[in-house]
Amino acid sequence: MTTQVTFSKPAGRVRLGYKKYLKLKRAQDVIEALAWASVLAVTVMFLVDGGLKSVTDFPSALNALSRLTALVGTDLLLIHMLLIARVPWIDKFYGHDRATQAHKKLGKPVLYLVVAHFSASVISFSITAGVNPIEELVSLFINVPDMWSAIIGAFLMIAVVGTSLTFARRRMSYEAWYIVHIASYIAVLAAVPHQFSSGSDIHGKPVQTVFWVSLYFFVLFNLVWYRVLAPMIRGWKLGLRVAAVSPESSDSVSIYLEGKNVAKLGGHAGQFYMLRVMTATAWWRPHPFSISAAPNDRFVRFTIGKRGDDTAALQQIKPGTKVLLEGPYGVFTEDRRIKEKVVLVASGIGIPPIRALAESLTAKPGDVTVIYRVRNKDDAALLDEVRQLCAQRSYKLEVMDGPRANNSSWMNADGTNRPDRDRLTEIAPAIVDSDVYICGPTGWTHAVEKCALRAGVPAHQVHAEEFAW
Amino acid sequence: MRNGTKAFVSIVSMGVVAAGYQVGLAAEMSNGFSASAPVIDQTSGATSGSTLGSTPVETATTSPAPAATSAATPVSPSTPGKTSAPAPVSTPQTTSSAPASNPAPNASGTTHDGSAVRYQYGIVQVSVTKSGGKITAVNMLQEGATSGRQAAFPYMIDLAIQANGTSFGNLSGATFTVDAFKQSLESALAKF
């Protein structure tokens, strides 16, 4: 396989420097401060309303606790939903992976607050009414308007978070987990009416009503537009179809997509798309894949390894099949680069974004070093292309093949017993003054990150992205 | 967040929370039923539903209404329906037994119990006595309320008798209690 590959030319100009990083940090601070301000706002509204002063005895203390946990919990729940909505103004600054991690982290605290609100109000009311909590719950369910749906919503939320815990996710199929997660939107909707009809902090209070109604609509708009409508509209406009499938190694293929509007796709090398194969059985399960060639106006290419049922099926995909792309997502791009020199590190099927980055980086000969870790040189995806590219642009290429040097090493055995760090600085002497891009399996990626940091690379020059969904 | 931003945001947050707490204390003192007499907001003579949106805090701060001392001001009657212009805001006194008198059920009238209405702060249930098409008495069968909201019931009884129905205004600070009272009252009136 020594077919000549035509590479796209880099843009030719790139902004670098530490100020670029500071600007990013500032933008992140603004977003985080806004999120914090929303929590602060609901707390202060509660206090201004005499929330703490209303506490006179045990039931009223529980009632105040129930109000505060409801307010903060709902606010965090809305932030939690925004984080997964693939909103460009969040993902641009944090990346889809970090937004998703934050989403997962918020899941449990939100649930705790909702459960605290639920139990505190039931117990508080039951003491006031002089009945036991179960009786009170039943009577709330029957008598108080909109409370039945709120109670159902609370139990649904418990189910959603329960199934998202690590141990449960390992046992569940992606499909089952997906259906439960759809239920979470129903749970949130079910809880909305009682907040407006009997929530002591919203009902009959114009300022609070305006605040909450606008917050709900803001989140709803972002969710519906960015998560559902925009990708659908754009996807249909692009009209992409599978043009060709070519084997890259014994367990990976490149899929070329073409369509009349492929030039309008945009995006940057290093980014990924959620790929939806529009067949009767697969359309509802999108999978994330990085583009394996820099964006160009002829085709979009993904290089896909065999990892599960769906990726195995993708190896057999027929030319002509309709494909919907959602994205581009991710910040594993030149947008994060601040130094002249770049070190690109890939392992196995982590090569596609590294290959695309190498093609599109604006760099002088010798400024880019590519390290490619493979099991077997004769069966490595895209290795031939990477070789040609590095030769054309005078980039340094280091292919590491064979078994690991030792259990804690991310490199291959080279006969010596030198630590990874020494070998890394030997391959890339200027690594401290370089941006390091890493893509591979999670454990391996962390090992390289750690090694680069120990070698003295500042944390903000280390870029890694994991697929998270 | 960077450490500098974090420090700044924390200091600002503490200030805002402290200010909010102070405002909360002040608002509660001029508003709470436990501390002073309720302020009756009788501006709308329309149906009971329209009173839900009134703002308790703002109306309360304008009229401090200390208990006792001044001579009893009679509550101006407002007829149900759209006839009357907005009635002046009046301040009933908690002294003696001014509004709290519940006449015993009239022998000539008929009495019906309303349904027990459950709301945030307990259960409210009334029984209504009517004579000659007029409400002559309202009795509380269950008066569940917390944080001094019980003090609102005598005023509501008075208002209901004057309005001869549920078309009376809100008691600021006891919006939910008034709602529950009106619901029970309505169900009782429906039985006549």
Image (cartoon, rainbow, N blue to C red):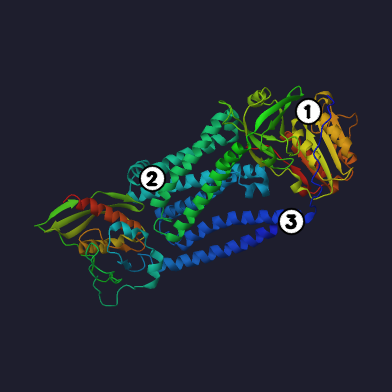
> Along the horizontal axis of the image, is B168 left or right of A213?
left
Residue at x 33%, y 68% (from the top left corner)? B39
Q: Residues within 10 Å of mark 3 (few under 14, many from 20)?
A: few
Read off the chain for label 3.
Answer: A
Query: Does the CB distance between marks 1 and 2 fall below 8 Å?
Result: no
Q: Position of residue A119 (x, y in %)?
A: 44, 45
N-terminal label among 2 and 3: 3
- Disc 2 vs disc 3: which is toward the camera? 3
Q: SS of the residue at dot 1? A: loop
Rendered location of residue A180, percent (x, y):
51, 34
Position of residue A458 measured from the top left corner of the image (x, y, whole percent) = 80, 49
Q: Label 1, label 3: how many angstroms apart (C-alpha)?
A: 37 Å
Amino acid of disc 1:
Ala
Q: Where A52 sits versus A134, above or below? A: below
Evaluate whether label 1 is on the same chain as label 3: yes
- Badge 2 crowding class, 10 Å Cα cut-off, few under 14, some 14 to 19, many 20 or more, is many
> How far apart in space, not on screen, are marks 1 and 2 (Cα)?
57 Å
Badges 2 and 3, same chain? yes
- Residue position marked by numbered label 1 in the rendering: A381
- Front one among A180 and A154: A180
Q: Which residue is mark 3?
A: A22
| Of the two numbered discs 1 and 3 in the rendering, the one whose residue sits closer to the viewer | 1
Q: Quadrant of the N terminus of chain B?
A: bottom right
Asked if marks 2 and 3 touch (Cβ < 8 Å), the reply is: no
**Separation of residues labelled 2 and 3 (CA atoms):** 48 Å
* Amino acid tagged 2: Met
Q: Residue A343 bears which disc, if any?
A: none
Q: Which residue is mark 2?
A: A147
